[in-house]
Amino acid sequence: MTARIIMFTQAGCFSCELMRVFLEARQFSFEERDVTADPEARRTMIEQYESEETPTLVVLSGNAREVVVGFDPVRLDQLLEGAPSSDSVNES
């Protein structure tokens, strides 16, 4: 099963840019939601994922979810280690 990755960001957030570069360098596909431009994204980040900071990264896989608040490359490596990247090939 492929994990869905959502990254909540805002303009001018240096840690958000670091997170974006980190994910792109590892070729992970992710959905980026700007909480300053999208009030619904802000509400979702606060109410559903209990975060008031950016970046907030949410990894959804099946019924499991992991939320990482702030840029934590060590935790991200551990969390995403087994997740397929966008260039992974599924064997039939």
Image (cartoon, grey):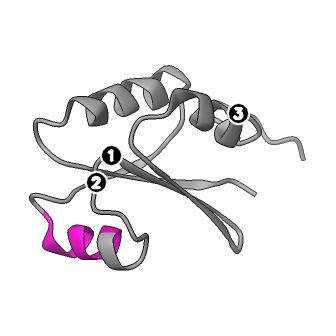
Tag of residue 55:
1
Q: Left or right: 1 with respect to 85?
A: right
Find numbered disc 3 in the image and state the secondary structure of the residue it sits on: loop
Q: CA distance from mark 1 to mark 3?
A: 25 Å
Find numbered disc 2 in the image and state the secondary structure of the residue it sits on: loop
Q: Nearer the viewer, residue 1 or 89?
A: 1
Find numbered disc 1 in the image and state the secondary structure of the residue it sits on: loop
Does 47 sit above or below residue 81? below
Query: Circle 3: is it few (<14), some (14-19), or many (20+) Cα within 10 Å?
Result: few
Q: Please report the residue visible at 70 percent of the width from the left and 33 percent of the height from the top.
A: 88
Q: Name the residue carrying label 3.
A: 88
Amino acid residing under circle 2: Glu
Amino acid residing under circle 3: Ser
Query: Circle 2: is it few (<14), some (14-19), or many (20+) Cα within 10 Å?
Result: some
- Determine the image quadrant of residue 8: bottom left
Q: Please report the residue visible at 11 percent of the width from the left and 42 percent of the height from the top.
A: 11
Does 55 sit above or below residue 41? above
Location of residue 2 in the rendering, given as x and y in whole percent from the top left corner: 69, 53
Q: Name the residue carrying label 2.
A: 53
Q: CA distance from mark 2 to mark 1?
A: 6 Å
Residue contact at pointers 2 and 1, CB within 8 angstroms? yes
Amino acid residing under circle 1: Pro
Q: Nearer the viewer, residue 11 or 69?
A: 69
Foreground tag (3 vs 2): 2
Residue contact at pointers 3 and 2, CB within 8 angstroms? no
Which region is colored magenta?
38-45
Residue contact at pointers 1 and 3, CB within 8 angstroms? no
Q: Please report the residue visible at 10 percent of the width from the left and 58 percent of the height from the top.
A: 36
**Quick check: is 33 in the magenta stretch?**
no
Foreground tag (2 vs 1): 2
Q: Please report the residue visible at 53 percent of the width from the left and 28 percent of the height from the top.
A: 73
